C-alpha cells in the first residue's frame, strides 16, 4: 500500500465524495439536488472521497452540526480540474522551489490539498494517507453549479454501520461500507498533489 493514493468509489464518469452538514444545509441539498442557501459560496468547503475519514471527521454523523452525512457524486472531469488547480496546504521541500513560491501558489489557488492518515473501521490511524480537497472561489462555484451529479443523505446508514461496529459485528458492518478502489490519477496531476507514483495512470 503506497502512502498517498486516492481511494474512492468511482465509475467512468463520476467519483463519490463526502461532506457532513447541519440539517438546514443537508436537507436542502438533498431536496434540491444542489447546494443552496444557507450553504455559502464564500466559505471554503472540504470534500473527501474516503468514507471512513468522513466517519472520523463527523463521528459517524453524530457530531453537532454534522448530523447529515452526504454522499455526493461529482463529475470526474470536475474532480480532476480541482486537483490540477490545487496547491498543497503546507510547504513541502522538493515539491515547491521555495517557501515563498509555495505561499504565492497557495494564495492564488482556489483549491487546497491535505493528506491525512486514513482510518480503519474503528477510526484508528492507518499507515497510509487519505486526501482531502478544499474548494474556494471559482472552485466552489464550479462544484455547486457544474460538477454535482447527485446528492444522497446516508446519515442513517452511517449510524447503523456504527452500531454494528460497536456490537463487534464487523463483517456485517464491512458489507455495508462503500467499496473503494484506487483512483487512477492522471500522470500530470501526481506531482501537483504530491501523490505516490501509481503503477498505472491515465
Image (tube, grey):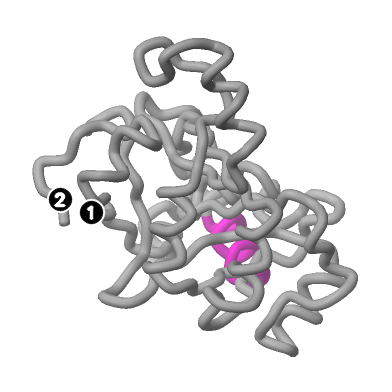
The image shows residue 102 at horizontal and vertical percentages of 54, 22
Query: Callout 1: helix, strand or loop?
Result: loop
Residue occupying image coordinates x 40% and y 29% = 126
Residue positioned 36% across, 30% down in the render? 194
Q: Is residue 141 above or below residue 193?
A: below
**Between discs 2 and 1, the one toward the N terminus:** 1
In the image, which disc is placed on residue 184?
1
Among the 4 quarters of the image, the one containing residue 35? bottom right
120 with respect to 43 (left or right): left
Which image quarter: residue 138? bottom right
Give left or right: position of 82 versus 11. Answer: right
The magenta region covers 155-164
Q: Position of residue 120 (x, y in %)?
A: 44, 39
- Which structural element holds mark 2? loop
Q: Which residue is mark 2?
A: 201
Q: Is residue 157 magenta?
A: yes
Q: Which is more toward the observer, 120 or 102? A: 102
Q: Residue 201: give x, y in percent of width and height.
A: 15, 50
- Left or right placement of residue 39 versus residue 85 in this view: right
Pick the front one: 3 or 153: 3
Residue 79, x across and y down, in percent: 44, 61
Where residue 77 sits, quadrant-wise, is bottom left
Residue at the extreme bottom: 31
For the N terminus, the image quarter is top left
Instruction: Tell me what residue is drawn at x 60 percent, y 63 percent.
Output: 158
User: Where is 117 relative to 95, above or below?
Assistant: below
Magenta run includes residue 156:
yes
Amino acid at each position: 500500500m503506497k502512502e498517498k493514493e486516492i481511494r474512492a468509489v468511482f465509475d467512468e464518469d463520476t467519483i463519490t465524495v463526502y461532506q457532513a452538514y447541519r440539517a438546514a444545509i443537508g436537507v436542502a441539498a438533498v431536496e434540491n439536488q444542489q447546494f443552496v442557501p444557507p450553504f455559502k459560496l464564500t466559505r471554503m468547503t472540504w470534500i473527501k472521497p474516503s468514507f471512513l475519514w468522513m466517519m472520523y471527521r463527523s463521528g459517524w454523523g453524530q457530531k453537532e452540526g454534522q448530523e447529515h452525512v452526504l454522499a455526493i457524486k461529482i463529475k470526474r472531469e470536475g474532480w480532476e480540474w480541482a486537483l490540477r488547480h490545487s496547491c498543497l496546504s503546507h510547504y513541502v521541500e522538493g515539491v515547491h522551489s521555495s517557501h515563498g513560491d509555495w505561499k504565492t501558489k497557495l494564495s492564488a489557488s482556489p483549491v487546497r490539498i491535505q493528506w491525512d492518515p486514513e482510518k480503519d473501521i474503528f477510526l484508528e490511524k492507518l499507515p497510509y494517507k487519505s486526501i482531502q480537497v478544499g474548494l474556494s472561489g471559482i472552485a466552489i462555484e464550479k462544484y455547486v453549479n457544474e460538477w454535482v451529479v447527485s446528492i444522497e443523505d446516508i446519515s442513517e446508514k452511517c449510524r447503523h454501520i456504527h452500531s454494528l461496529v460497536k456490537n463487534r459485528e464487523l463483517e456485517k458492518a464491512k458489507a455495508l461500507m462503500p467499496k473503494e478502489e484506487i483512483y487512477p490519477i492522471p500522470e500530470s496531476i501526481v506531482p501537483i498533489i504530491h501523490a505516490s507514483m501509481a503503477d498505472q495512470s491515465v
